[in-house]
Amino acid sequence: MSKLSDTRIVFMGTPHFAETIVQSLVDAKYNVVAVYTQPDRPSGRDQEVMQSPVKIFADVHHIPVEQPSRLDASAQETLRALKPDIIIVAAYGKILPESILDIPPLGCINVHASLLPRWRGASPIQNALLAGDTETGITIMKMDAGMDTGPILKQTKLPIDPSDTTATLLPKLATAGSELLLSTLREWLEKTLEPTPQSTEGVTLCQLIEREDGKIFWSHEAETIYNRYRALSPWPGIFSFWRKDASLLRIKFHSIALQKQSPETHHELGQVFEIGDTIGVATARGTILLNEVQLEGKSCVSIRDFVRGYPDFVGAILE
C-alpha cells in the first residue's frame, strides 16, 4: 500500500456511537469503501421504519451501504468483492463468523466501550453504570472468534462522573473511541503495533438490557436504584406501579436524585413522602428523590405539578 489513505476500509456499526467513529474516519480522509449496518426496523409507538444513524451518515456522504439480515454465504461474497484491507467494527450488533474475520489481510479491528476484559459483550456502557463503576474507557482490539476476547491494541481510561447516565457517558466514550482509533489505526497500518493478549483475570460479561429491566424494586438500596436509573436513561427508563383505587398505574421516572441517608421518620418500602421541598420514596437504605415523572398515557411533568394533580400520591406505596 503506497499510502494509508489508499487502505480499503469496510466499516460495520449501527447506533450513534458507531456514527461518531465512522465520521472520524471520513474526516481523517480514510478510504471507507462501504458501511455495513443493521437493517431498517420499525420503532416507537407508531412503528415507523427507522434507518440507523450509520446508514443516514453514509447516505449523506455517498458511501455504499450494505444491510444484510444474515451474514450468510451471499453476504460474505458481497463483502469479499469489496476487497477490504481492514474491517473496523463499532457496535454493529452482529457477531462476525470466522469466515468474515479471515477476509481482510489486516484483520478486523473493534472499538469497544469498556476496559476489556471487563464488560465483554453488548451494552458495556449500561453495565458499567449498573455496577456503579467509577471508571471505564475504550479498548481497540483485534477481533477473534470469541466474544470480545481478542488481543488488545490500545486502551484509554475515562472517569465516570457520579451524575453520568448512558445518555451523557455515551458521547464522551464515542469521542474518546474516535481519537484512540485514529492513533491506533495509523500504527497498525504501519505495522508498528503489537497486540497484547487480554488478561484472564477481571473478566465480566454484560447482561442483556431489556425493557422490563427498568422495573424498580424498592427493597433495594437507593444507590442501587439510582445506578439503574443512570444505566437505563434514556432507554428503557425506570418505572414503578401505583395502585390507585381499582387501577394499577405505571409511572415512569424521567429524572431522580439520590439521598444516601434514610430520613429519621420511618416509612414503608416504596412509600411516597414529602421531604423538604421535594418528594421522596423510601428504600432499604436511603431515599430516591423524584424530579420528573410520567403517568402512563400522560405527559412528563415536574413532581410538584404531578402532586398538585394527584395529591393522594403522597403517602402511596409504590409497587
Image (cartoon, grey):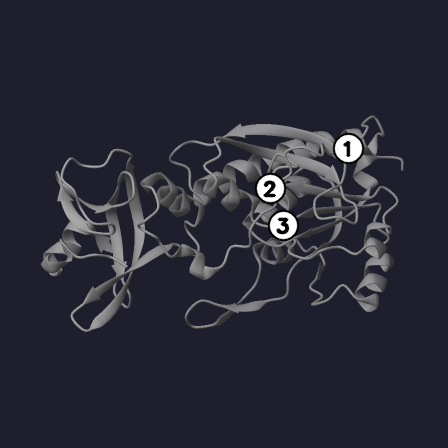
Q: Nearer the viewer, residue 129 or 175?
A: 129
Q: Which residue is mark 3?
A: 91
Query: Considering only order in the chain, which callout, 2 or 3, is on the residue closer to the N terminus?
Result: 3
Q: How many labels were placed on the picture?
A: 3
The residue that appears at 29% across and 40% down in the rendered structure is 257
Q: Nearer the viewer, residue 178 or 307?
A: 307
Task: Name the amino acid, label 2.
Answer: Trp
Residue 202 placement (x, y as % from top left)? 63, 34
Residue 255 placement (x, y as % from top left)? 30, 47
Q: Nearer the viewer, mark 3 or mark 2?
A: 2
Query: Considering only order in the chain, which callout, 2 or 1, is on the residue closer to the N terminus?
Result: 2
- Mark 1 to mark 2 CA distance (whole Å): 16 Å
Q: Which residue is mark 2?
A: 119
Q: Which residue is mark 1?
A: 197
Task: Name the amino acid, label 3.
Answer: Ala
Dot 3 and dot 2 residues touching (CB under 8 Å)? no
Q: Quadrant of residue 156?
A: top right
Q: Nearer the viewer, residue 171 or 82?
A: 171
Mark 2 residue element: loop
Mark 3 nearby-residue class (10 Å; few <14, some 14–19, many ≥20): many
Looking at the image, residue 107 lies above or below residue 198: below
The residue that appears at 16% across and 70% down in the rendered structure is 245
Q: Quadrant of residue 59?
A: bottom right
